[in-house]
Amino acid sequence: MAKWDQLEAVVVQVHREKMTVAEAAPIFAEVWPWLRRQYGGWVATLRPYWQQTKAAGEQTQTDPFQLLLDLESPTAILGNWRAMQHLPAAREALNHLLRDQND
């Protein structure tokens, strides 16, 4: 979960221009490859959760995790409104998964 938190923070901060692409690069280089390697084991578990969320005011049709993991560099975050619109769907899915695991 900590790596996902780092991804989320970088996306938000770079998008809002609170962090430069250069500042984000080392975090990106560490976090994205790790999450990409791990995500295959989580795809099926997370799918029903993100399918219950909304992105851009509509039912989420695109895997928000994969959308964010497909970003090739911190530069791809700049001006990427679609990524920002799907970030809350990913967070909501994770929160619901964690809630269900703790029940």
Image: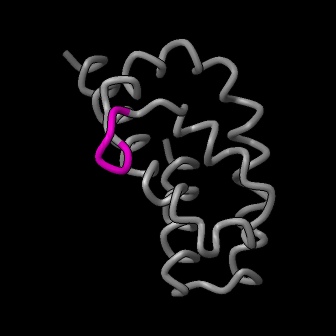
Asked whether residue 56 is drawn in magenta, I would say: yes
**Extreme residue toward the front, this view:** 58
Which sits in the foreground, 62 or 92? 62
Left or right of residue 32, residue 96 in this image: left
Name the residue located 43 percent from the left edge and 41 percent from the top edge: 90
Position of residue 80 in the picture relative to residue 89 (left or right): right
Q: Is residue 15 magenta?
A: no
Residues drawn in magenta: 55-59
**What residue is shown at x 48% (from left), y 81% (from top)?**
16
Colour basis = one colour
Give 72 or 56, whichever is nearer the viewer: 56
What predominant SS class does the magenta segment belong to? strand
Taking the spot 51% from the left edge, 64% from the top edge, the residue there is 81
Location of the C terminus (image quadrant): top left
Q: Number of marks in the image? A: 0
Measuring from the top left, give residue 35's x and y in whole percent. Answer: 68, 40
- The answer to which image quadrant residue 95 occupies is top left
Residue 3 in picture, x, y percent from top left: 58, 49
* Image position of 29 (left or right of 62): right
Residue 37 coordinates in the image, percent (x, y): 77, 32
User: Where residue 10 sits in the image (x, y, percent)?
Assistant: 57, 67
Above or below, 98 against 5 in this view is above
**Relative to 59, 47 lies left or right:** right
